[in-house]
Image: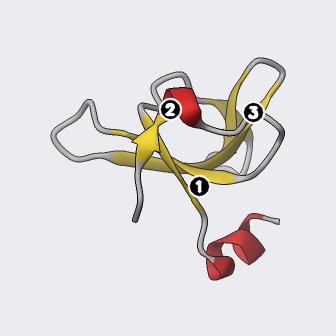
Amino acid sequence: MNWQPISTAPKDGTVILLCDVGYAAPEYLIGRWRHDRWWGKATNSGHSIVWNEATHWTYLTPPLVDEAK
């Protein structure tokens, strides 16, 4: 994957893969920029969550794009 700094991520509502490398094991979230913050779906509840810890991002591959819809 071609990870890029979060400062370069699209903020037009495009669904992307977000990553936080600030932990021993990186954390990931499929999300998008909305209402001035990163939003995604919690895997355990399906509720929308705000994620402020994103450090990197990349575009989703086609199967993940379909799953995010």
In the rendering, at what x and y percent does residue 24 appear?
15, 40
Q: What residue type is labelled 2?
A: Ile
Between disc 2 and disc 1, the foreground one is 2
Q: Could you tell me how far apart the alpha carbons at marks 3 and 1 are, in whole angstroms?
A: 22 Å
Depth check: 22 or 60 in front? 60
Q: What residue type is labelled 3?
A: Lys
Mark 3 neighbour class, 10 Å CA radius: few under 14, some 14 to 19, many 20 or more: some
Question: Where residue 11 is drawn, which disc sits there?
Answer: 3
Q: Quadrant of residue 33?
A: top right
Determine whether the residue tagged by mark 3 lies in a helix, strand or loop.
loop
In the rendering, at what x and y percent does residue 53 appear?
45, 25
Residue at mark 1: 43
Residue at mark 2: 6
Which sits earlier in the primary sequence, circle 2 or circle 3?
Answer: 2
Between disc 3 and disc 1, the foreground one is 3
What scheme was used to colour the molecule?
A: secondary structure
Q: Could you tell me how far apart the alpha carbons at marks 2 and 3 are, in whole angstroms?
A: 10 Å
In the rendering, at what x and y percent does residue 8 appear?
56, 33
Mark 1 neighbour class, 10 Å CA radius: few under 14, some 14 to 19, many 20 or more: few
Which sits earlier in the primary sequence, circle 2 or circle 1?
Answer: 2
